[in-house]
Amino acid sequence: MTNILVLGGGFAGAYAANTLDDLFKHDDDVAITLISRNNYMVFTPLLAEVSGNVIEPHHAVPPLRSFLKKARFQMAEVREIDTKAQHVVVEHLDGGTVNLPYDYLVIALGSDTNYRRVPGAQENSFDLKTLEDAMRLRTHTLALLEQADVSTDPEERHSLLSFVGAGGGYAGVEGLSQLQDFTKRALRFYPTLRREDFTFTLATRGEELLGEGDERLGRYAANVLRRRGVKVRTGVTVKEVKPDKVLLEPGGWVSAYTVLWAAGIEVNPLVRSLDLPKTKQGALIVDGHLQVKDHPNIFALGDCAAVPKEDTTYAPTAQNASREGIVVARNIHARIRGGVEETFDFHPIGTLASLGSHQAVAQVWGFPVTGFVAWLMWRAVYLAKLPERGRKVRVFIDWVLELLLHTDIVQIRVEGGPPIERARPDDAPVAPGGPTESEEGKPERPDEETVEASAAASQ
Ligand SMILES: Cc1cc2nc3c(=O)[nH]c(=O)nc-3n(C[C@H](O)[C@H](O)[C@H](O)COP(=O)(O)OP(=O)(O)OC[C@H]3O[C@@H](n4cnc5c(N)ncnc54)[C@H](O)[C@@H]3O)c2cc1C
């Protein structure tokens, strides 16, 4: 029996396992196992719409088992990869660990958020990488609206309704745009709040937004956002994040209970710890066939691999990762059954970024497309790419409902407490009427009595 283990159920791993499953469907002497932490694949291009309350969370994550027929899936945490003993140690949900031997290993463990050692960024900002991140942001935003509605302190209210996006790439631009759109749609339920009460700031180190694409797209996106009142700040570095404010340089402190962190990624920590050839950033060095250097039975792809492209490497995108998955599967098939191996060579037709409010930017065959047409293209392309027919139908219905109905403002406390507390210091009694500065200069949080008192006063 030949054992093929695929680690990671993101774009790279899911497509590798799906193609292997297909290629070996009649071969009883080959066992394929996909291992991942969750039993679904996160379709990241839809995450901003989840946080913006357009799409129901479950609809943006196709189940991994739907990619497989003959291959097995194990929901488990990969703890260790022993390349000498040729096994992987995985931990199942009950905490028990098992060693899974392999003949061929596919490493597709992706990336984590890079907080760039910015003090407070990890603790005090909101990420947009997992489904939980998107749900947390959505719940938090609704909590802010509820709190702002009852707040009598203008300064606190300003901070509650101030949103800062850190990072001018696709995730930062799409994430902040959706938040603005969401709060705008929710306003009809909050008569005490006005659009002018909200502040949206997008800060990026680069000189243009969407630096990965055509600079005309970046300029168009910046113009659209500025027209909508977003303060687009280019050439700006985030230096520190506190629960209720963020330090920009140049610019100084900006009050904000919400910092959306989309300022970069780093290779998965487990991959960085492996004794395999790696770049300085920790990405696995592979050849054009996606085989790890000097390891004929180990392949790596997606965000955790440095896939060679002329004199550079392929960008960490879903487009590249999913196609790399297909090539890895074909090359493993060729190695086991004989045949010619493929070199990964992919030129995307284009890139797309949604700006919310029925606007988007796109670059197709090198030509920029903007506005409503680009937005229609964005939706058509991602609906087509979304795996599984059932998900497509669900997302399509969500989009239709968004056009027909008011946004849903039900705020469910998924984490057992108002998420707004996450954005505040822990031990902070406060004077009635709003937060004060503590000795360390931190704003303070109302104790429960004060909250109850102000709630009663507002009735
Ligand atoms: C908000 C957002 C929007 C994006 N939009 C686009 C877009 O529009 N177009 C585009 O091309 N790209 C986009 N990207 C980038 C794209 O999502 C990534 O490049 C892509 O997901 C990389 O795929 P991957 O399989 O390498 O890694 P991932 O998708 O990160 O998958 C890694 C998988 O490994 C699992 N895993 C990790 N560690 C372990 C462990 N120890 N044990 C078990 N399982 C583990 C994870 O749970 C995950 O399932 C976006 C990214 C974000 C965050």
Image (cartoon, rainbow, N blue to C red):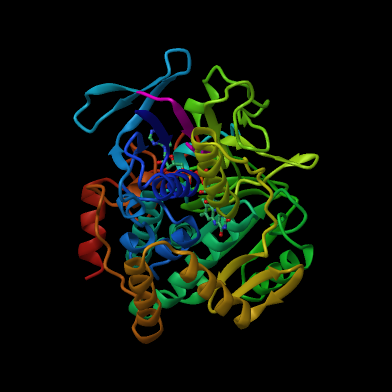
Residues drawn in magenta: 101-113
Tell which of 88 and 362 is nearer to you. Answer: 88
Task: Please name the residue shown 53% across and 48% down the image.
Answer: 326
Pick whichever, 61 or 435, lies toward us: 61
Assign the magenta stretch its main secondary structure.
Answer: strand
Q: Nearer the viewer, residue 66 or 223?
A: 66
Name the quadrant containing residue 249.
top right
On screen, residue 220 versus residue 4, left or right, reads: right
The residue at the far front in this view is 338
Instruction: Give the quarter of the figure containing the C terminus.
Output: bottom left
x and y percent of residue 316 in the render? 61, 46
Extreme residue toward the right, this view: 311
Q: Please say whether residue 342 is visible from this viewpoint.
A: yes
Percent across and percent down for residue 99 are 31, 20
Taking 339 as reference, is 86 above or below it? above
Q: Is residue 15 above or below residue 150?
A: above
Res 102 quadrant in image: top left
Q: Residue at x 70, y 67 (%)?
A: 222
Q: Is 89 situated left or right of 110 in this image?
A: left
Whole-percent x, y for residue 9 in the image = 41, 44
Decide: is 270 above or below 328: above
**Depth check, front residue: 147 or 339:** 339
